[in-house]
Image: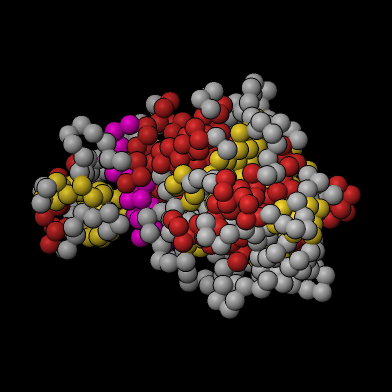
């Protein structure tokens, strides 16, 4: 894991392998962003002009390297684009700083230590830069033995971050904890499904529980059968790797509220008997991204010592076709007692979530939030970078949307139209697991709502788009697992602890 330090040293005097500065656009002119005045002075006040000569434009996502002149201890200067400069006295947007720091960290792969002289005017700015740098420095190399491969940036030193100031210190500590937990989720998502089986995922939760003082309970296939968890069992019955339901709980002695988080954990999704077509299977190890986000968020709440009880439910199964697999037309009796006609075995996420939602509801939490890579329909609606939010309470849905925006995660509130419920009527069972094709993401939300306890505030995050990034890395977002929604869930827990929700 990349180390993070707050440094009182000046940009010109700190010994590092690279020095990161910001470049912004002010009208038609390029300007060096605040925090790098000493660097600009070493270039005789011509750093922006030199960078422009090299083709830099100051656009977000841009990175330009150049050798340092005499007067700087670091041999290399890396300028990252910040886009338009804000009005005098105002800070750059936190997400702009986060992405710029991430771009810098990715560009500096193979570097031991980098000093970040980006504009930090408040503790919030320091948090954004730290978080972006730590997330940008991520790499998944567990299955690679190439000794010549460059390692991620080893150390990030934040300049101008006031290490003796309590606010700055707390901001840096929070950023490090959250970034490390996001990277934990990324590691799980990227892990090959032959190794990350439901049992292995449950073991990872147990190990984290011991490390962070969390209470972990694991229901194996025998306990699930005895308890009547027909949804989870129905999805996992076709695999040689049996399912699990994991409860991982953080409690605080002063907590007045409890937040329950439920995550879809399909460690591999072939579609079951309703087999996915060729070209749609290769990334299906990521179908447990919701459970990874929930797991990491509970651990983050514990590390931050939040005054709220946070309980995570990980609904883990592998969806495979076999002679024992659930068939289209089968009827499952869920943990709630309701029966579900399975019309499509590839609509399995809602089945495991339904059982977990019912179980979570029995503890009467103040709110339940489920997270899942649930539907391709949501990707069609919102694209690859935005997750959808549905809820049985409009104010709660709005609050989560605003929290996501605050922490830099793209989201959009979605409705739960009552008229779509009729499409899931079944002549055989209480409800079918499929409804109308159009609005499929909303239909899935309506299905889940049927299994939420009466009177409990509930929200559903469909992260099918942003959970796994198949394109080239950008900002602090790597190729592969992203850890989508962890920042939103952690901030939601903080707001709940503060009595704001």
Above or below, 500 against 19 in this view is above
Q: Is residue 423 visible?
A: yes
Q: How is the image coloured?
A: secondary structure
> Residue 258 in the image: x percent, y percent?
65, 30
Above or below, 428 against 134 in this view is below
> Residue 365 in the image: x percent, y percent?
67, 31
Horizontal side of 486 relative to 60 (left or right) equals right
Horizontal side of 141 relative to 45 (left or right) equals right
Residue depicted at x 51% and y 25%: 500
Looking at this view, is 466 or 379 the one in front?
Answer: 379
Q: Choose top left, top right, bottom left or bottom right for residue 68.
A: bottom left
**Magenta-colored span:** 97-122
Q: Is residue 13 visible?
A: no
Labels in figure, total: 0
> Residue 201 in the image: x percent, y percent?
70, 55
Does residue 326 show up magenta in the picture?
no
Above or below, 184 against 392 in this view is below
């Amino acid at each position: 894991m990349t180390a993070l330090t707050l440094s009182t040293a000046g940009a010109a005097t700190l010994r590092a392998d690279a020095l990161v500065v910001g470049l912004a656009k002010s009208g038609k002119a390029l300007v060096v962003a605040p925090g790098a005045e000493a660097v600009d002075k070493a270039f005789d006040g011509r750093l922006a002009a030199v960078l422009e000569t090299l083709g830099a434009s100051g656009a977000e996502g841009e990175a330009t390297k150049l050798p340092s002149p005499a007067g700087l201890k670091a041999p290399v200067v890396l300028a990252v684009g910040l886009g338009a400069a804000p009005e005098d006295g105002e800070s750059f947007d936190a997400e702009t700083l986060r992405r710029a720091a991430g771009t810098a960290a990715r560009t500096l792969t193979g570097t031991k230590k980098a000093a970040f002289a980006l504009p930090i005017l408040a503790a919030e700015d320091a948090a954004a830069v730290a978080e972006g740098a730590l997330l940008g420095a991520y790499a998944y190399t567990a299955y690679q033995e190439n000794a010549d491969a460059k390692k991620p940036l080893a150390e990030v030193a934040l300049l101008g971050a006031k290490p003796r100031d309590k606010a700055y210190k707390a901001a840096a500590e929070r950023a490090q904890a959250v970034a490390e937990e996001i990277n934990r989720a990324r590691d799980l998502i990227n892990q090959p499904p032959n190794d990350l089986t439901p049992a292995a995922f449950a073991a990872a939760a147990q190990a984290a529980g011991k490390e962070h003082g969390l209470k972990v309970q694991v229901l194996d296939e025998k306990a699930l059968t005895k308890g009547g968890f027909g949804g989870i069992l129905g999805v996992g019955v076709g695999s040689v790797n049996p399912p699990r339901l994991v409860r991982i709980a953080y409690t605080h002695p002063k907590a007045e509220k409890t937040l329950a988080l439920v995550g879809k954990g399909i460690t591999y999704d072939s579609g079951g008997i309703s087999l996915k077509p060729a070209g749609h299977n290769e990334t299906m190890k990521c179908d447990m991204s919701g459970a990874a986000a929930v797991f990491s968020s509970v651990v983050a709440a514990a590390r931050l010592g939040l005054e709220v009880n946070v309980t995570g439910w990980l609904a883990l199964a592998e969806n495979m076709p076999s002679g024992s697999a659930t068939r289209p037309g089968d009827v499952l009796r869920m943990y709630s007692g309701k029966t579900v006609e399975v019309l499509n075995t590839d609509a399995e996420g809602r089945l495991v979530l339904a059982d977990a939602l019912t179980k979570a509801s029995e503890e009467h939490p103040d709110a339940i939030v489920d997270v899942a890579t649930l539907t391709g329909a949501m990707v069609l609606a919102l694209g690859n970078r935005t997750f959808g939010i549905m809820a049985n309470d409009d104010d709660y849905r709005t609050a989560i949307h605003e929290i996501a925006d605050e922490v830099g995660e793209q989201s959009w509130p979605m409705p739960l139209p009552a008229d779509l419920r009729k499409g899931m009527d079944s002549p055989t069972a209480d409800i079918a697991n499929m409804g109308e094709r159009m609005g499929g993401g909303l239909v899935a939300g309506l299905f889940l709502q049927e299994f939420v306890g009466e009177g409990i505030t509930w929200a559903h995050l469909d992260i099918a788009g942003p959970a796994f990034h198949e394109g080239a890395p950008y900002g602090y977002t790597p190729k592969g697992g992203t850890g989508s929604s962890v920042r939103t869930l952690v901030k939601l827990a903080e707001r709940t602890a503060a009595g704001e929700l």
